[in-house]
Amino acid sequence: MPALVQATDVYAADRANNVSAAIAHDPAYLYVPDSISNDVYVIDQHTMKVVRTFPGGNEPQHVVPSYDLKTLYVTADKPGSGSLIPINPKTGRPGNPIPVDDAYNMYFTPEGRYAIVVQEAYTRLAFYDPHRWVLHDTLTLPACAGIDHMDFTADGTKLLASCEFANKMVVVDVATHRLLRTIALNQVTGGMPQDVKLSSDGKVFYVADMMANGVYLIDASSFKVIRFLPTGKGAHGLYVSRDSRRLFVTNRDEGSITVIDLRTRTTTAKWWIRGGGSPDMGNVSADGTILWLSGRHNNVVYALSTSDGHLIAKIPVGSGPHGLCVWPIPGRYSLGHTGILR
């Protein structure tokens, strides 16, 4: 794994406008998969208008940057007919589908050797050669129903993944592809864990939980639950600001964003989307000023100010927008999802 730019900040390479020269001239687009219409909407970030749509496979869920930043992949997860559709980010146009079944989500091991295809319907992680798309091995996790999101420890040796329908988390050894432990979340209140994000200091994982309506803090060394932090109804997506100081939590079922101070691990603000909404997945713009999010149940994409959360724009799209990818963005290499760069 490439050495961290700063030992105390895993996102130090993601500073505003610190875009790799190799992708700096890629068009500033948003790629919005629609899991109902089976299309991908391409939006110009400057004009805030849809410039084209193209087929995204059978139930497209996320658009994922490749480890080397050269390709974006649309993950489509319909069991039996799933696929990856490569997008050339220099043109914003798709290539031919790659037959990878049940590709709900996708990540890359921190040294770039494997693509980890999250096969939610089959309750497993599939490790692929990301250049030839040949399957290397799989890890079936029968106790992890609804496996969907993950992030990696600062040293790249372990991953923490959420089990949406089992109210659990699993820890996997990155080198051996083996399950290390299972973490039960609150069994009294019930839960539905979603997105996972490592804190900037690398000491804590934040886990959004849609049913518990907040985020769990899990120690990144011991993997013990530290505490629970309420944020809002339907806590879903997690995004770090370009200065590594704040974490934005999308509360999908109440139309709000909660801001967490990553140093104090406390909430500092809550921003409500004017007119309501269902903020879901997305990322922060390259310059750090806009939080772009799909409106999962409102047929729109939101542009929100990262300074005070005010609504800049609502851009109409299809009826099922999901794992929106902002491109290009700062960073040296991609760990996957909608743009976890380090």
Image (cartoon, rainbow, N blue to C red):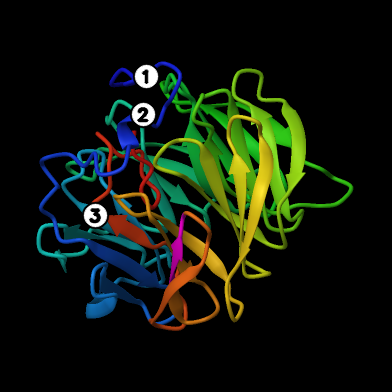
In the rendering, which numbered label is found on residue 251? none
Of tags 3 and 2, the one toward the viewer is 2
- Real-space Cα separation, disc 3 to disc 2, in angstroms: 23 Å
What amino acid type should be assigned to the residue bearing mark 2? Ala
Mark 1 residue element = loop
Rate crowding at label 1 as few (under 14), some (14 to 19) or many (20 or more) other CA atoms within 10 Å. few
Which callout, 1 or 3, points at the residue further toward the start of the chain?
A: 1
Q: Position of residue 253 (x, y in %)?
A: 67, 69
What amino acid type should be assigned to the residue bearing mark 1? Gln
Q: Is residue 182 above or below residue 229?
A: above
Which callout, 3 or 2, points at the residue further toward the start of the chain?
A: 2
Rate crowding at label 2 as few (under 14), some (14 to 19) or many (20 or more) other CA atoms within 10 Å. many
In the rendering, which numbered label is found on residue 12? 2
Q: Is residue 131 above or below residue 233?
A: above
Q: Report which quarter residue 331 is drawn in.
A: top left
The residue that mark 1 highlights is 6
Q: Report which quarter residue 96 is drawn in.
A: bottom left
- Tell me the magenta residue range: 302-306
User: Residue at 14% across / 47% down in the picture?
Assistant: 23
Decide: marks 1, 2 in contact (CB < 8 A)?
yes
Farthest residue in the front direction?
Answer: 308
The residue that mark 3 highlights is 72
Which callout, 1 or 2, points at the residue further toward the start of the chain?
A: 1
Q: Position of residue 114 (x, y in %)?
A: 31, 34
Rate crowding at label 3 as few (under 14), some (14 to 19) or many (20 or more) other CA atoms within 10 Å. many
What amino acid type should be assigned to the residue bearing mark 3? Leu
Q: Position of residue 188 (x, y in %)?
A: 89, 47
